[in-house]
Amino acid sequence: MQRLGVFLFGLSTFVGFGIIAWLVFHFTGGDTDSNYEMKSAARAEKIKEIAATQVNGIVPTSSDLETYIAVNSEDNVPKASKKPVPGTKAFEERMKAQAAAAAKSSETETETETETETETGGPKAVEITINALGNPPGTMKFKETEVEVAAGSKVMLTFMNPDVLQHNLVLVKKEKTNAVGALADAMLTDPEALKKNYVPSSDDVIASTKLVNPGGLEKIEFIAPSEPGDYPYICTFPGHWRLMQGKIKVTK
Ligand SMILES: [Cu+2]
């Protein structure tokens, strides 16, 4: 008796769903033959309309095809770039090799900061190197988060990017990280943003590099502020600045 109950319950559920499906199909029009015919007719009309607006029609002639084959035959295909595509294992390996090479070269010059007196007796020149963090890839951080320079010195900054993302380095006035960061985010809708290297035009920007590609570097020169204090540097690629921050400590 209990078994029969379960069976009837299952049957009624099955039939119930069948009825609902039929109702839905019936009242929404379904894909009936006449319905389909009508759609086909409309489609054919549309195709005719498109064909009529093409000067030479849309169907290629056999001579078109011959030309296509001649131009695209194996011998004429330009050799594909050997550079691996981001996201592939080959690309990861290439990035690792680049990072290793970069690490080796920075090992040889143990001291990345060197101070030299300029010949003219002008401001002291100081060389600094700041890296984007390349490992783990895509972390959106600077490797060096604090660098010291003397006030008013001539700074020769090398920004290296061993990461898989594009980054820049923008030095801003004291406590202007959020202000410049907000302008950077707003550049998402600026069609000229790439041309501007995602560097907002603002009086709060002291110095900036261009947008540096993965594995690339950029050298810039600027005069350190005369007023001692902490001057933040950020990457202004939209969104990056929240994580990608460091500061140049300007000393007396
Ligand atoms: Cu960045």
Image (cartoon, grey):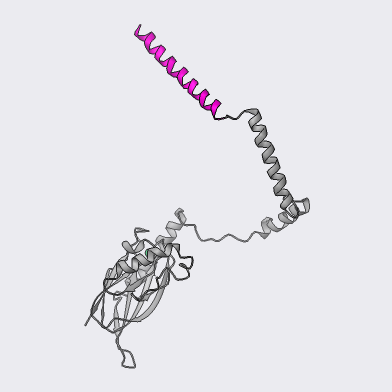
Q: Position of residue 58 (x, y in %)?
A: 72, 50
Q: Position of residue 105 (x, y in %)?
A: 36, 71
Principal secondary structure, stretch drawn in magenta: helix
Residue at point 51% right, 61% down? Answer: 83
Q: In which quarter of the view is residue 164 placed?
A: bottom left
Visible residue check, residue 143 = no
Residue at point 50% right, 24% down? Answer: 21
Compare residues 1 and 83 and report the one nearer the observer: 1
Residue at point 37% right, 67% down? Answer: 183
Quadrant of the drawing holding the C terminus: bottom left
Q: Which residues are magenta?
A: 1-28
Residue at the bottom extreme of this rendering = 120
Q: In which quarter of the view is residue 95 placed?
A: bottom left
Residue at the top extreme of this rendering = 1
Q: Position of residue 30 (x, y in %)?
A: 57, 29
Quadrant of the drawing holding the N terminus: top left
Q: Position of residue 210 (x, y in %)?
A: 42, 72
Residue 7 magenta-drawn? yes
Horizontally, residue 111 falls left or right of residue 83, namely left
